Amino acid sequence: MVNLTIDNIPVSVNEGTTIMKAASSVGIFIPSLCYLEGINEIGACRVCIVEIEGKEKLVASCNTVVEEGMVVYTNSPKVRKSRKTVVELILSQHDCYCATCSRSGNCKLQAIANDLGILALPYEREVVQKHWPADFPLVKNSAKCIKCMRCIQVCDKVQSLNIWDIEGTGSRTRIGISGNRKITEADCSLCGQCITHCPTGALRERDDTARVLDAIADPDIITVVQVAPAVRSAWAEHWGLDREFATPERMVTAIKKLGFDYVFDTNFSADLTIMEEGSEFIERLKDKENHKFPMFTSCCPGWIRFIKTQYPDMVPQLSTAKSPQQMFGAVVKSYFAEKIGIDPHNIFCVSIMPCLAKKHECAIPVMNDACGDPDVDVVLTTRELVRILRADHIAPVELPETPFDSPLGTGTGAAVIFGATGGVMEAALRSAYFLVTGKNPDADAFKEVRGLDGWKESTFDINGIKVRTAIASGLGNTRKLIEAIRRGEVEYDFVEIMTCPGGCAGGGGQPIHDGIELAGDRVDYLYTLDKNNPLRFSHENPDVLAVYKEYFEKPLGHKSHHLLHTDHEAWKLDFIPNPNNKKRYY
Amino acid sequence: MSRLSIITPNLAQTTVERLYKELESRIVASPPGLCPVDMAASFLKLCHSQTCGKCTPCRIGLGQLENLLEDVLEGRATLKTLDLNEKTAQVVADSADCAIGYEAAEMVLRGLKGFREDYIEHITNNRCTFRLDQPVPCVSQCPANVDIPGYIALVNEGRYDDAVKLIRKDNPFVVACAYICEHPCENRCRRNMIDSSVNIRGLKRYAVDHAKEEYVPTLAEPTGKTVAVVGGGPGGLSAAYYLAIMGHKVTVYEQRSQLGGMLRYGIPSYRLPRKKLDDEIKHILSTGIEVHTNVSVGKDITLKELKDKYDSVYISIGAHTDKKIGIEGEDANNVISAVEMLRQIGDGTNPDFKGKKVVVVGGGNVAMDVVRSSVRLGAEKTTCVYRRRKEDMTALVEEIEGAIAEGVELVTLKAPLKIEKDENGNAKALWVQPQIIGKIDKMGRPSPSNASVEPQRIEADIIVISIGQGIESREFEKYGIPVKRGIISALDTGEITNHEGIFAGGDCVTGPATVIRAIAAGKVAAANVDEYLGFHHEIKADVVIPNPKQIDKIPCGRVNMAEREASERKNDFECIEFCMTCEEANQESNRCLRCDKYGFGIFKGGRIDKW
């Protein structure tokens, strides 16, 4: 143990503890800006500086380790003056039009500046606005960037893609795209983790809310909206509502108030995905000689972008099943349009997703199988949903519950866990067991695949067939897993990949809580919804059974091949490989 | 009424003088990779503030150039701006009245030529092509990328064994380098911004002199692959060492009777004691390297035979042939080459110089090794003849000073003309043509030319020619290895185009260079041979580096190495340099700014744990 005093309070902590953590152990909160535990501990912003008695220079408390007998002051006159000036300097290069910022009220810089009581800036304002392609799903506003380096670090350390990098030197140092590329040329997965880890409004999703509101306003257009599983675990966080209160049904009421004609559930198409992908997996298992294993899940568009750019030779190992979002769109503009007797060209299909890459997925040129128009017209992130609800001054706390609309509004417990890492695998195994044995397993028989570990593996015995499974979430973990497969160190039959750590619950389109990782809480909630659902098996979803009976006939049938499956190699992803990823020995 | 007064600088003047000095050493500590346009703009601003204000081109022109550069940096420029920039700079260079103006403009012009691509990148894409690749200055300057802040921190904690272990991760010749490395790591040390660079080599010397346990590396599982290394110098043995650790079976072919290359046959023992070298080589060989000495590849065994017998071959033959001046009488009996003389000493047969007048031609480090050895071999008088000035010598300043202290005469600005022989064919004297120093050449060195003075005669019993070394590349060229002007052509990965599996590096690829560059080449070759053989072994040290201590960085003088008295040391070949004391090592290691943990290092590139 190391003994020291902080603000005259004696503290005793383990060797290697930082001053910031030592302070927090006795209830002293030191403000910080760039610090992100385990990811960005580089002392760049200098907001968390403290004074050590007898030392001339102030030190960053986030990465300075305690020493025996240290006497630390977190608010000495020198610290007070320096911290405030440092924040004033940051503000002098920050676009402070907070009123038009997506992060106003949820901005670390704004909070710190307010806490410090900065009422005017003594410095000349030097805000640099750089060009950014307006139609790209990821938006960077350089005028709001404070060069905290978090985006670089998340992309490097968590997602292993190294998209962001320092550009320029000296006073012109800024965050650019690695290897002197443009974002449109980069092998970005569009995971959006840089957005959810940005302390300010420098990074956000492309705002597509206007297109949705325009469609709602057009009387000739039928608006259909689907809501992804993970959205229900986070949609009401902005209002601080308990998840137990903020039920999916209350969310439906809120969304209906916006004026959509039909509010459906992506859980429906998640169950449909299981029928298709589960059957596909069993077909491949029966024909092992003609297929390369493992088979990879295909529901995560960030992962699809990742494999297409990093391991293009493995693309044939992806399941050909479309993602639930795209299956849903294809079903709406075919089966559903026929069923209610309208021209699919008059349907505007919106999806609300915890995801940034879904904005790219719906725009993939080949995703237009139902009627030639894009199967899904617009994707909104959970954050954009919250924004339009707020704009309509909808107060969820006052709302009653309403069920999803029919006929695409029923989802099972197996579908709702698609929003958690391991959920797709578990749902698939539940139904695969049924498909092989003709009877249901215990719904919790495969719960070994749950949990937030970045790389999980389990082997199950289904009627004498040994199924070796692995699950990864986060692209850094994914890369490790794939490299191990390629080196022949591990062998699997079926692998689930989710781009974001924790799965969609931790998705790049989810609400942002600086420094707090909520994926775990949201995942727990999704498993509760699964447990409480009387339907636990995708193959028992009555809406899914109906759509097969009335339209698709059977999984992997002719129609489903056309509408529910896709050729991942039918479209090209133009990019320049990251030149910095080349191995260097010098 | 007084007519004159004594000028004493006031506080403002002395402060500015000090700022000039600080700026000078700050520029020394510039990390590589800074934006050259930004630097040019900053230099120009400094130049402009020096203007007296009298003349138009300098007073206004430099300011307008500043604006134009600023436009480039701020993305307001077009390619036409570049033309205006060039025209304006040329006019200032041509029309300014004094050097303050025209030299500032010349700097701008040089930049417009030298980094034009970066100018264009700024204009067309509004960004800079330069980047900070390795932000820890010492590590980036060390060819082998040794973890310098890491081992300094370990020395500071008294963990000498760990320090040596950490260095061996990147450089197996830790002891040799502790004694003789040219320490490029110290050149851009950030400590220069406070006072002066940390004595890095001195601290390494302290670590190796105080390490107790010899660290034995763990060898990877045998791979069954075989590698032949041609040449047992520092580069070849470094490659062999890492390849052996990686589990490959390595055989070294050395044409001399002993291993060590230039460490043995070039560097005298008063700089690197033989016992230290022998122990280090023994340690390297303990990884299971097979050695064949007295085998010359090309004569005793062909490269083709090696290629057929082994899975991969690394050529690291160094640069061991002598170069001739090409003057009359050079064939005299008692004219020898530096290489020949140092080789004899390396094999333990010291030539007899007792009572002789020895004249050495050359001004590099090898020439200094020769003159200082000559003194130790008992020469009555040792003269170093060089065609330029002392300050133009390529030898390290401390080597030149050491030689002078030991009684060597420096005769500068004298170009060798001919060697006078007696009737028996023995050299009697070196005739030289006095030179006048002249114009600066393209490389920034002043060129000498013949002075209008009669040739002079320097009496000599022995003449040693030390004007550089060549490479015995002919046998390799015959096999088909590409050779340009005697130098083997290899890529920066050590690979040789169209010769899969054959690698080359060190002096035979770069021309005569430093030990640490040869070691680095060996390290690079080891990594790439391993990849070529289909493996990806990782070399790491598993040493926990201490966190930086909270020490105020108060300006403090650098501890320099003490040497034995010149009058004493010149009589023997014993080591001339003393190790630091414990007190000195502690103070010196505390001076390290830990750029691995502060500044950019904590963000990126501060530590390369493995390669």
Image (spheres, rainbow, N blue to C red):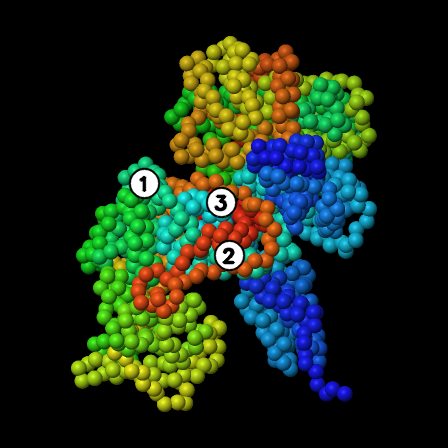
Q: Would you identify the image quadrant in which residue B509 lies? A: bottom left
In the image, is residue B247 above or below residue A376?
A: below
The image position of residue A72, as x and y in percent, is 67, 41
Mark 1 lies on residue: B247
- The foreground one among B130 and A37 is A37
| Residue A161: x %, y % from top left | 54, 41
Determine whether the residue tagged by mark 3 lies in a helix, strand or loop: loop
Task: State whether discs 1 and 2 lie on one chain.
Answer: yes
B457 over A205 or under it: above or below: below
Give the image quarter of residue A48: top right
* In this rendering, the label closer to the viewer, 1 or 2: 2
Residue A168 visible in the shown view: no
Q: Residue furthest top?
A: A439
Q: Amino acid at mark 3?
A: Glu
At x 57%, y 68%, the residue is: B111
**Label 1 secondary element:** loop
Compare marks 1 and 3 and give the one earlier in the sequence: 3
Q: Are marks 3 and 2 in contact (CB under 8 Å)?
A: no
Mark 3 and mark 2, same subunit?
Answer: yes
Chain letter belonging to callout 1: B
Residue named by callout 3: B157
Q: Chain of mark 3?
A: B
The mark found on residue B198 in the picture is 2
The residue carrying pointer 3 sits among few (fewer than 14), some (14 to 19) or many (20 or more) residues within 10 Å by Cα, namely some
Q: Residue at x 77, y 30 (%)?
A: A389
Compare marks 3 and 2 and give the one earlier in the sequence: 3
Q: Is residue B283 left or right of residue B98?
A: left
As displayed, is residue B131 above or below residue A369? below
Quarter of the image that includes the C terminus of chain B: top left
Percent coordinates x, y for residue A132 in the rendering? 66, 48
Where disc 2 sits, the SS reads loop
